Amino acid sequence: MKAIVILNPYAGRWQALKRKPELETALLKAGIDYELLITQAPGHGPELAAKAVLDGSLLIISAGGDGSISEVINGMMLGAASVGFDRLPPVGIMPLGSANDLVVNLKLSTNLNEAAQIIASGNIKKIDLGEVNKTRYFDNNSAIGLEPTITLIQQQITWIHGVIRYLLATLLGILKNPHWDIQIEWDNGIYQGPSSLVTTGNCPLTGGLFFMTPHANPFDGLLTFVYGYMATRLQVLRLLPRTMKPGAGSYVEHPDIHEVHSPWLKIKTHQPTPMHADGEIQSTAINEISYRIIPEVLPIILN
């Protein structure tokens, strides 16, 4: 049976469709027999992926960016709910996005020829997935507060592309100086008080630059979440460079920032907050959020 390749033509700031010949050449050189499907609109990727699972496909390949991968994974999980999670086929990644966070987190190659060779190797390992509000799965991260506020800002910035756009949106978000009064409950813990953000990670890196949950591990059966409160814009700005450090000197070492590992957490906010999952806004105003980890559920082809 042929591999199903789901291509998002709009990934990488509408560059993915232009790279279609390069994509197909790489797959053919790697000896991968495939059927190429092109998504027509947001939300089409999950439909195609769910159908591929229901049809018994043996391999699904996501060709696109992080949003594309997230759509494919959510569709696969939807299909698996009908046929059983033990029948999930492996997923391979052909990176065509701007940041390719999941690819970087999993130490895969961003080169299409090398990515195709990795897929052809068939080295499968199961990773954890996060679930938010029992409606959305995420492979990388989800957040409320400052992080999705920044996401909403960067979506409005159309005259700058790439990492610079994320940085500009971050600075504009910090200038707003938002915070929320929240209650967080998790396995053996609770917090109540002000917070600038709650970011929940399955992997460390997001947005191409930021290690928001620097000690997250997609193989440990736990979510890693960070919460904390910075009272002034200057405090946040001083802390910002440390969000780009994966190791020593990370922002989670600040005494007012807390990093926690837990299989679940529940959040209630007094003021509505936006919420995203894998960079896709799920709500612009929500007050109750619940997260849980699903350990070793998604078969993915790795190095």
Image (cartoon, rainbow, N blue to C red):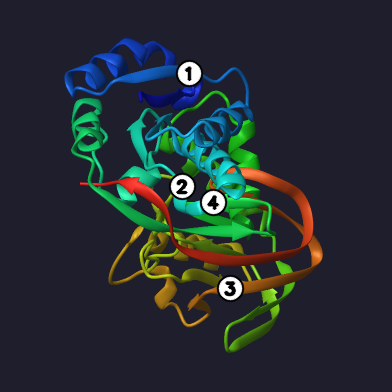
Residue 229 spot, x, y in % from top left: 61, 73
Residue 295 spot, x, y in % from top left: 45, 65
Local SS, label 1? strand
Where residue 95 sits, quadrant-wise, is top left
Mark closest to the chain's N terminus, 3 or 1: 1
- Say which of marks 2 and 1 sits in front: 2
In the figure, 27 relative to 80: above or below? above
Residue 184 shows in the view:
yes
Residue 37 is tagged as: 1
Residue pictured at 50% horizontal, 53% vertical = 85
Residue 253 is tagged as: none
Residue 259 shows in the view:
no
Give, as a three-letter code, the residue at label 4. Answer: Gly
- Say which of marks 1 and 4 sits in front: 4
Neighbour tally class for label 4: few under 14, some 14-19, many 20 plus, Cα within 10 Å: few
Residue 264 is tagged as: 3
Give, as a three-letter code, the residue at label 2. Answer: Arg
Local SS, label 2? helix
Residue pictured at 51% horizontal, 21% vertical = 10
Q: Name the residue under label 4.
A: 84
In the figure, 116 relative to 247: above or below? above
Q: Name the residue under label 2.
A: 87
Residue 158 spot, x, y in % from top left: 57, 25
Quote the CA–CA distance across marks 1 and 4: 24 Å
Q: Left or right: where does residue 38 sit relative to residue 233?
A: left
Give, as a three-letter code, the residue at label 1. Answer: Leu
Local SS, label 3? strand
- Say which of marks 3 and 1 sits in front: 1
Mark closest to the chain's N terminus, 2 or 1: 1
Mark closest to the chain's N terminus, 2 or 3: 2
Where residue 45 sits, quadrant-wise, is top right
